[in-house]
Image: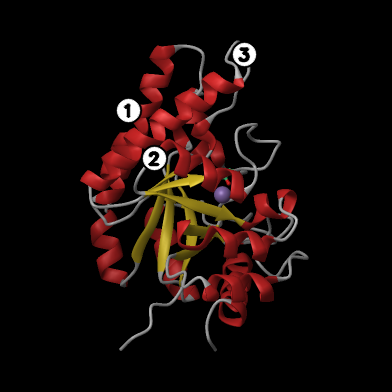
């Protein structure tokens, strides 16, 4: 019997406005996939401006040709392009945010990939109280989790660091909130960059989150590729193996010193810490 293993992935952004963002490949879908394959990855994570943009790409063709999986699709384009988010004071904007995310869930699910709620979760403030914001977020997670289930995927909620959201910054708090809302089919995206800023002990937080962990952003303390910062990946890898994590560890990192080196360093660290040898 083959034991489920952690799979490797690397990010491709096709959002020109995010050219300085933490994505390894920025030179088109096909090029990104080809370079991901050359570096030995199992899959790719796509950051695109909209569901229409995803559908305009030869996603299935390129993935099949290269033998890659689509690990996940980001929804942050709705924030980067339109400043839409789920806790916005204007109900029309909140509704647009939900529709936008559902569109990305649909487009990702066509390739078996879950969508990620990161920056589009928003924040409280601007006349929206913390309580109201949590109410908006909770209802959206129930709705989006259900929508993803209908599409045959899970929905990934990513708790971010304090400089990017004031909603949830700690893994334990995010897990407790999801459970309290009763949102089904929602899993946590553990981004090791955000966790490095917030957690007392990253490995312990992962272990405590257990089977709620659905995806990992595998990246170093400084948001460079894993191995180019000072995170200690040995206990993190041990925790992921201990909880039986078999999703994707995806390199959401800056292409520094260049994309190829970031991809190669990630793969080296992946092999050293996230596989059984
Ligand atoms: C944002 O900082 C982040 O980590 C992304 O994965 C979410 O949009
Ligand atoms: Mn992330």
- Which residue is the site of mark 1? 99
Depth-wise, is mark 1 or mark 2 nearer the camera?
Answer: 2
The residue under the point 29% across, 35% down is 103
10 Å crowding of disc 1: few (<14), some (14-19), many (20+): few
Q: Which residue is mark 3?
A: 126
Query: In which quadrant will I find the C terminus?
Result: bottom right
The residue located at (54%, 75%) in the rendering is 242
Circle 2 residue: 182
In what quadrant does ligand 1 lie? Answer: top right
Give the left or right position of residue 203, taking residue 75 as reference.
right
Residue 64: tell me if it is visible.
yes
Q: Looking at the picture, how far across and down is residue 259, in whole percent? A: 59, 61
Look at the image and tell me whether residue 53 can be seen.
no
Residue closest to the far front: 180
Distance between the alpha carbons at the discs numbered 1 and 2: 21 Å
Q: CA distance from mark 2 to mark 3?
A: 27 Å
């Amino acid at each position: 019997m083959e034991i489920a293993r952690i799979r490797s992935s690397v990010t491709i952004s096709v959002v020109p406005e995010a050219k300085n963002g933490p994505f390894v490949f920025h030179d088109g879908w096909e090029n990104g996939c080809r370079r991901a394959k050359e570096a030995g990855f199992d899959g790719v994570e796509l950051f695109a401006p909209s569901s229409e943009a995803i559908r305009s790409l030869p996603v299935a063709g390129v993935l099949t040709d290269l033998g890659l999986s689509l690990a996940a699709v980001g929804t942050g384009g709705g924030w980067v392009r339109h400043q839409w988010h789920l806790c916005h004071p204007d109900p029309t904007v909140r509704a647009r945010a939900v529709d936008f995310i559902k569109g990305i869930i649909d487009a990702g699910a066509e390739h078996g990939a879950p969508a990620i709620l990161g920056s589009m979760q928003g924040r409280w403030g601007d006349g929206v109280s913390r309580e109201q914001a949590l109410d908006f977020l909770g209802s959206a997670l129930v709705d989006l989790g259900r929508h993803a289930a209908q599409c045959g995927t899970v929905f990934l909620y990513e708790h971010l660091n304090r400089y990017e959201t004031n909603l949830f910054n700690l893994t334990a708090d995010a897990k407790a909130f999801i459970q309290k809302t009763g949102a089904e089919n929602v899993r946590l995206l553990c981004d090791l960059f955000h966790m490095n800023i917030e957690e007392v002990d990253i490995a312990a937080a992962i272990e405590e989150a257990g089977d709620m962990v659905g995806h990992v952003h595998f990246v170093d303390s400084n948001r460079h590729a894993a191995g180019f910062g000072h995170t200690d990946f040995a206990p993190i890898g041990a925790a992921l193996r201990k909880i039986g994590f078999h999703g994707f560890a995806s390199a959401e990192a800056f292409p520094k010193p260049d994309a190829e080196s970031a991809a190669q360093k990630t793969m080296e660290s992946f092999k050293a810490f996230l596989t059984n040898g």
